[in-house]
Amino acid sequence: MTPEFIQELIETGLPGAQARVQGDDGVHFEATVVCEAFRGKLPLARHRLVYATLGARMGGEIHALALRTLTPEEAERPA
């Protein structure tokens, strides 16, 4: 599993999303996902949307995925 493939899965599964995925060992990854679909949703609901794009790969090919999920406005704010 590669960060690029995970990014493609997320961006395909969440139209309009922009994902940045990192991970060096092929099973543990970190992702920042910016998507309008997150507006008005709590963090758990946002994470579920992302996990749905990855399906059965979660817990299998992808052992762990740390997520940061933001709306476009949240992403524009200084950290």
Image: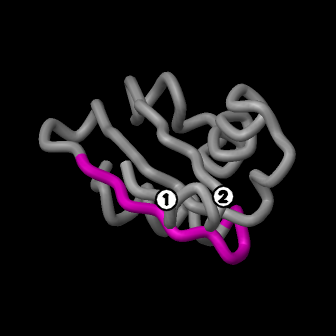
Find disc 2 in the rendering and name its residue.
71
Q: Position of residue 29 (x, y in %)?
A: 31, 38
Residue 15 magenta: yes
User: In the rendering, at what x and y percent does residue 69 appear?
Assistant: 57, 45
- Callout 1 crowding tier (Cα within 10 Å): few <14, some 14–19, many ≥20: few
| Tag nearer the camera, 1 or 2 | 1
Residue placed farthest to the left in the image?
24
Of the residues under marks 1 and 2, which one precedes in the sequence?
2
Q: Which region shows up in magenta?
A: 13-22
| Residue at x 33% of width, y 65% of height | 4
Vertical side of 21 occupied by 4: above or below: below
- Image location of residue 64, percent across then percent down: 39, 25
Q: Nearer the viewer, residue 72 or 2?
A: 72
Three-letter code, disc 2:
Thr
Inspect the magenta stretch and tell me whether residue 18 lies in it. yes
Q: Report the side of 21 relative to 44 (left or right).
A: left
Which of the labelled discs sits on residue 77, or is there none? 1
Q: Decide: is 40 above or below 44.
A: below
Q: As drawn, is 34 to the left or to the right of 5?
A: right
